[in-house]
Image (cartoon, helix red, strand yellow):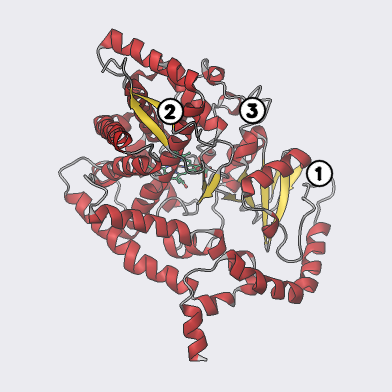
């Protein structure tokens, strides 16, 4: 027996193909209980309310879990096309309600924000990573979360971000030099790696006043590795017992919970604790010091989680958005030329490139950035919300305890919001130059896109995010042309799942110095 346990403990991670046989056995055993459960949930349909359509392809006990395919966001978008703006999925024991209509999403997440701003339970993110609700991203609404959110906003609000603009400019300048240099040495580069260094350097400077000079810096490698491990642990395949409680015995064999606990205790916590302590004594301005200066006294246990929430939230989202920008620009060289011409016109007038605070003087560039995020959303489902109490919206009842998931792909091709939604048309935003942050807090009919989420949980760093993306874009197209390698155009039609994000398939492009560059 000891031997067998050792063998199972040596299995590094639970893969879907390892789980399927176990699921099959459980399925047979649990079919009867599923019938009871499912029929009782059907009879719960409240009289006088519209029923939420359920896609057909559901299996006993596991429900829709294994019908989602390799790219669940695509499958769900197709179901919305067939069944309408709201659908219900049985994800094992958990009900998901997915939404494709921005107005309906606004009513659910904003109008009914008091009931719908919770986060669903997840074994890794809630039990281990956030130590049962510390930090911000996985904390439940309440006094603690409110205080931390207000502390974060006191540092990342539009006025405060200005303090970090020189640093962002300098990092974006370094980014372009690195990419130009590597493009000369290699036949095309994958910008993913360069954007990762850029976004991590910006967010770690903002949060803790720490910059990494080289990708070979052991502290940089350790941080990247820790963030990547956290993402992997958070994957759905490691959370099956949360959806399928009857197979929670799996943990006995895989010890996945023990591995999660060890990762937090021996890897994440020591590195985060060290960073927090360094930040307090750093000579550079940083968010952790600013909290104290702004009168917030955040306990160290919360700070350790919060720091990782921000490092994690602020790295992949930015780098993936930038990867999409470059892939799209490569596919649309005429848009690239118009953007470069607009930047050049600014340089001729001012003798320097535009800063983020002058963004309205380069309206076409702003529109391109908004259209890129509409055309290819950064996340598949934002960060799902959980519903604390039954909520009635447009005649539907969203049941207490369900998880509500915005389908980013469907929302951004809604023809009522975006005429000709499958065309890449930056011009559609020329009359909507508000910052993305202001737009995400505005009326639903006046929003540019929905990438930053909704209501009380809306991304607190939208202004910083736009500043980073804008600055990199301006620096790149003031100095470079981006071209495909050997006519191999980056594929923008086949996204791949990357944690909560949707990334373009890996590609290579050339960053070529512009012969007509004015700087
Ligand atoms: C293009 C870049 C970004 C995108 C698309 C994005 C998107 C999102 C979304 C969809 C949410 C969830 C909103 C909801 O629950 O309705 C969110 C929350 C959050 N984001 Fe961002 N984000 C970006 C950049 C950043 C950056 C740079 C940071 C860090 C500085 C950050 C930190 C956070 C945090 C801490 C939360 C959790 C807030 C809460 O739960 O109260 N994000 N973001």
Question: Which of the 4 image quadrants contains residue 248?
Answer: bottom right
Mark nearer the viewer, 3 or 1:
3
Q: Quadrant of the C terminus?
A: top left
Nearer mark to the viewer, of 1 and 2: 2
Instruction: Quickly name the residue at label 1.
Output: 50
At 30% from the left and 33% from the top, the residue drawn is 184
Give the vertical position of 461 relative to 480 (above or below).
below
> Residue 229, image x and y in percent?
41, 60
Q: Residues within 10 Å of mark 3 (few under 14, many from 20)?
A: few
**In this view, 1 is above or below 137:** below
Q: Position of residue 31 (x, y in %)?
A: 78, 71
Tell us which disc is closer to us: 3 or 2: 2
Q: Looking at the image, which residue is at 32% across and 35% down?
A: 179
Location of mark 2 (residue) = 483
Residue 182: give x, y in percent of width and height: 30, 37
Taking 374 as reference, is 203 left or right? left
Specify the quarter for ligand 1.
top left
Q: Can the viewer see residue 206 in this picture?
A: yes
């Amino acid at each position: 027996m000891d031997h067998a346990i050792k063998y199972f403990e040596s299995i590094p991670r639970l893969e879907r193909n390892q789980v399927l046989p176990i699921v099959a056995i459980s399925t047979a055993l649990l079919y009867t209980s599923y019938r009871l459960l499912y029929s009782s949930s059907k009879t719960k349909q409240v009289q006088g309310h519209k029923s939420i359509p359920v896609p057909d392809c559901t299996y006993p006990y596991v429900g829709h879990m294994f019908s989602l395919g390799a790219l669940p966001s695509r499958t769900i978008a197709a179901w919305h096309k067939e069944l309408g703006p709201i659908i219900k999925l049985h994800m094992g024991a958990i009900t998901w309600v997915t939404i494709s209509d921005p107005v309906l999403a606004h009513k659910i997440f904003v109008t009914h924000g008091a009931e719908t701003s919770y986060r669903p339970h997840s074994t890794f993110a809630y039990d281990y990573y956030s130590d049962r609700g510390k930090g911000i991203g996985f904390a439940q609404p309440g006094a603690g979360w409110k205080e931390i959110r207000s502390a974060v906003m006191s540092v990342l609000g539009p006025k405060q971000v200005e303090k970090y603009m020189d640093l962002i400019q300098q990092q974006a300048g370094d980014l372009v030099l690195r990419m130009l240099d590597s493009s000369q040495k290699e036949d095309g580069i994958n910008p993913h790696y360069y954007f990762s260094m850029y976004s991590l350097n910006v967010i770690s400077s903002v949060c803790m006043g720490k910059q990494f000079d080289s990708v070979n810096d052991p502290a940089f490698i350790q941080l990247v590795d820790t963030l990547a491990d956290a993402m992997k642990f958070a994957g759905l395949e490691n959370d099956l017992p949360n959806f399928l409680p009857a197979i929670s015995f799996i943990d006995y064999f895989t010890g996945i919970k023990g591995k999660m606990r060890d990762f937090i205790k021996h890897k994440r916590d020591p590195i985060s604790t060290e960073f927090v302590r360094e930040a307090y004594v750093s000579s550079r301005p940083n968010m952790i010091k600013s909290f104290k200066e702004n009168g917030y006294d955040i306990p160290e246990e919360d700070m350790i989680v919060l720091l990782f929430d921000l490092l994690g939230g602020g790295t992949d989202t930015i780098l993936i958005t930038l990867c999409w920008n470059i892939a799209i620009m490569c596919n649309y060289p005429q848009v690239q030329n118009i953007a470069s011409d607009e930047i050049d016109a600014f340089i001729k007038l001012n003798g320097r490139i535009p800063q983020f605070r002058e963004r309205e003087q380069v309206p076409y560039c702003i529109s391109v950035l908004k259209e890129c995020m509409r055309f290819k959303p950064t996340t598949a489902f934002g960060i799902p919300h959980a519903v604390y109490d039954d909520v009635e919206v447009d005649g539907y009842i969203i049941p207490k305890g369900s998880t509500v998931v915005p389908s980013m792909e469907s929302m951004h091709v809604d023809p009522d919001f975006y005429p000709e939604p499958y065309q890449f048309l930056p011009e559609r935003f020329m009359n909507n130059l508000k910052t993305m942050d202001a737009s995400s807090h505005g009326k639903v009919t006046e929003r540019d896109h929905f990438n930053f989420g909704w209501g009380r949980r809306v991304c607190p760093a939208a202004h910083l995010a736009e500043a980073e993306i804008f600055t990199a874009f301006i620096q790149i197209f003031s100095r470079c042309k981006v071209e495909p390698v050997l006519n191999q155009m980056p594929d923008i039609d086949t996204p791949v799942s990357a944690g909560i994000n949707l990334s373009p398939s890996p590609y290579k492009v050339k960053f070529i110095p512009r012969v007509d560059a004015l700087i």
